[in-house]
Image (spheres, rainbow, N blue to C red):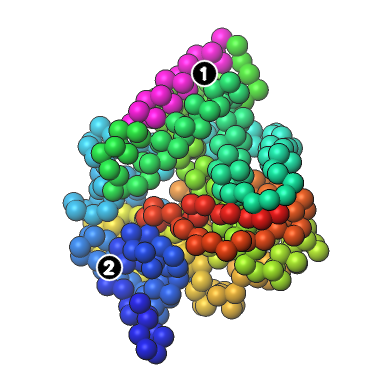
Amino acid sequence: MADDQGEVPVPQGIIEVSAFMPDARANPHPKLKALREACPVMRDEMAKTWFLTRYGDIRETVNDRSFIRNPMSAEEGSINRQFARDEEEARRTSILFLDDPDHARVRPPLAKAFYARINRMKAEIEQIVDDAIAALPASGTFDLMEEIAVPVPVTVIARILGVDEARLDDFRQWSEDVILSLNPVRTPEETARMEAGGTALDAYFAELMEARRKAPGDDLITDMVQLQAAGDAPLTDDEILINLQALLVGGNLTTTDLIGNGVWLFLNHPDQLAALKANPGLAAQAVEEVLRYEAPVQATSRIVEKDKSVAGCPMKEHQVVFCSLAAANRDPDAFDAPEAFDITKKRASHIAFGGGPHICIGAPLARIEARQVYVKLFERFPDMKLPDQDVVWRALPFFRGIETLMVSV
């Protein structure tokens, strides 16, 4: 809380700026600003991690290929070790946490096939968005998250993968269940749901892969099994399965939040909404500004492979370095008027998608979906408003997204 002078005390630990804390969940930016100004390189002994908040330090760190990602390499007691319950789970990991040489072997063929598929399906992806918006009620109040932000990304990725439309409801539920893997402090019940969803998805993807080997389709799973058969993608079936799940986990929730956060920002900044409606050509730049201003992914981490200096501080092998993307994206050393949401301003590149070899693989798809939603939603509902409500932000650490967003049309 702020004192009488309106100043925010400098946080002493990473938990204080995470969604675990109600004030930071509602608005993490004042605390992050205080840290960036007073202690831009913080050591949190309790969480066994370093925490960076300056744009320059973070951009350099995420692009530095000498850092590693596998949580089994992290210091004992660190947050990252919470993601590795045992060594078997850590070995069966996706590109999100793979290190070279495996990362350099697995990611390129997956990314090449994924990007080619997105490019071929761009019009179809936009049509999915248009159909969802057309199906909304013509008047009244509805939850934008439930009607658009949650179902659109799942439907899009299902279409890209080649999921049977008759299994779409199951697929959506399994997707919601595996997203629980992003929470390092799951309850036993949530862990059971996550594991059951993951098992069901594995079985379904294995079934689809076998079916596509016999009868190819026009989808990403066909692309992957054909690349594999041709020897162009040296991946095992298990590696394909776990990375198809990673596309779900890494893409659905964050695209949902990019859509929800953007609509919320526009409805709270009528001047910016007016600018978008007057010039829909600003949509691409608007997506970048939403990503900068209210990034769905608040932080990313790296692990020090060998003793080295990071952001001017000596750090030791196995130590974890958390990078606050949210703090970096409002650093006045990188952005003019960083606290202003302004889609008309051409800004420096944000780092909401991270960087380096682990830059977000789903970034191009998220941009297509968000851009289409922003333009078409306000085109259909030019007078959309936010009714009085207490907006509740999700309590998922290091992510930022709205649980429910009621809108009136």
- Could you tell me the amino acid type at mark 2? Gly
Q: Is residue 300 visible?
A: no
User: Residue farthest to the front?
Assistant: 140
Residue at figure coordinates x 33%, y 80% from the top left? 9
Quarter location, residue 25:
bottom left
Q: Is residue 368 left or right of residue 99?
A: right
Quarter location, residue 214:
top right
User: Residue farthest to the right?
Assistant: 278
- In the figure, 194 relative to 139: above or below? above
Q: CA distance from mark 1 to mark 2?
A: 45 Å
- The answer to whether residue 110 is magenta is no
Residue at figure coordinates x 49%, y 55% from the top left? 401
Q: Position of residue 271 (x, y in %)?
A: 71, 71
- In the figure, 389 relative to 95: above or below? below
Q: Position of residue 51 (x, y in %)?
A: 33, 65
> For the residue labelled by badge 1, is the local secondary structure a helix, a strand or a loop?
helix
Residue, disc 1: 208
- The answer to whether residue 211 is magenta is yes
